[in-house]
Image (cartoon, rainbow, N blue to C red):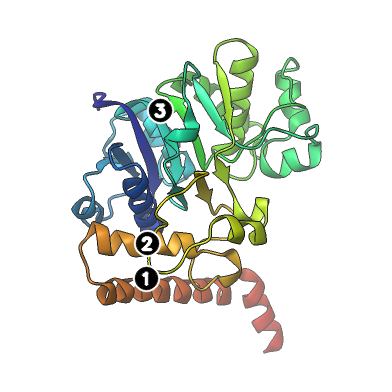
Amino acid sequence: MEVQAPFGIVTACHQGDLRYVKATLASASHFCPDVPICVIADGDFDTRELTDAYPVIIIRTTEIDDPVVQQYCRGNPRSKLVAMWHGPFDRYIYLDADAIVWGDIRKKLCWNDEDFLVFWNQPTEHAHRSWLAEYYMKIDSVLARNPEFEWMHNPYFSTGAFACRKNVISKNEWVEIEEWRKTEPDLFSWTRDQGILNYLVFWKAQMGQLKLGYRDLQWIPEHRGIEITKQKFTITRSGYPKSVKDPFIMHFCGGKPDCYRWKNYSLPFTVSRYSFHTNGRGMSSFIAALHLFREELIAATGHVWRKMNSPKNSKKLHNQQ
């Protein structure tokens, strides 16, 4: 796809994320109304509900004639890389489908000449092998392949929110690191994109091939603390606040923002889902509430079904019999 705008917002979703991405679109459209939005749809599911609500650009992984995309970026979190190689924007902010914009984040973005912006707190301590292995990479194995990689002082980040220039990492660079997995499949952990993206961003910055910037723009409730999140993101069920002094991207990468998960403080996300139906689709408050109830009922039922049919519960039930 040809570049249609110098700057935009990108999100990605599969069919199971559809109820989430509605909140992403509603919040971005509300707080950054003049910024174009692109949705990377990973699959052939119906997206008319999204395009009826907002003038979003839809790119499908199934329709891109690119062997790298077809091999690596379909059916997994690497679908976000489509924006880096085939997206419509020269520079963009990326959000996972379980993230929302809270305030006009451009006020804190201050994007000058950097190629990649990490949305995270500045590191306060040296990286430790234990949590690097759990969330990012087995660092000793990485060092065996690249002993020059400086790993201890990087601000390792969740790849559910970041900003970058198009093609800042080439397909060849990505595929080269993917080849490492063939001999050690668990070299990079957590998701299929997070470890590799962290490694490549920091390594290219260390080599002088990428100018790196840092912004404290990603707020993960489970990381920052639920109580402080409630204090900072105070809201009523009637709608968005009139103004937000300290904008953030709220990313629910731990506890998901489903209404039935009360402890996760999902109210700001729920308000955005509600806004999708009222402001985006022009529904009445009552009809919008019915849509939310239906989505939550389907999600909760699926959650219970998966839990009941998990291998652990199946074995427990067999032992009881």
Q: Amino acid at mark 2?
A: Arg
Disc 2 designates what residue? 273
Quadrant (top left, top right, bottom left, bottom right) of the N terminus? top left
Mark 1 secondary-structure assignment? helix
Task: Using the image, determine if residue 77 lies above or below residue 144.
Answer: below
Q: How many marks?
A: 3
Q: Residue at x 38, y 68 (%)?
A: 238
Give whichever of 278, 196 is nearer the camera. Answer: 278
Q: Position of residue 106 (x, y in %)?
A: 43, 34
Q: What's the amino acid at mark 1? A: Glu
x 61%, y 69%: residue: 263
Residue 304 visible in the current orientation: yes
Q: CA distance from mark 1 to mark 2?
A: 10 Å
Q: Which mark is residue 295?
A: 1
Mark 2 residue element: helix
Q: Residue 255, position in %: x, y? A: 59, 60
Q: CA distance from mark 1 to mark 3?
A: 31 Å
Q: Secondary structure at mark 3?
A: helix
Between discs 1 and 3, the one toward the N terminus? 3
Question: Please, what is the three-letter code of the amino acid marked with disc 3?
Answer: Met
**Residue 42 visible in the picture:** no
Q: Earlier in the sequence, mark 3 or mark 2?
A: 3
Q: Residues within 10 Å of mark 3 (few under 14, many from 20)?
A: many
Residue 24 lies, in percent from the top left, at 39, 51
Q: Residue 84, labelled with which disc?
A: 3
* Snapshot quadrant of residue 184: top right
Residue drawn at x 26%, y 38% as measured from the top left: 63
Q: Residue furthest top?
A: 208
- The picture places residue 77, in percent across and down from the top left corner, at 48, 43
Whether residue 195 sits left or right of residue 64 in the image: it is right
Please report contact status of discs 1 and 2: CB closer than 8 Å, yes or no.
yes
Give the alpha-carbon distance from disc 3 to disc 2, as whole Å. Answer: 27 Å
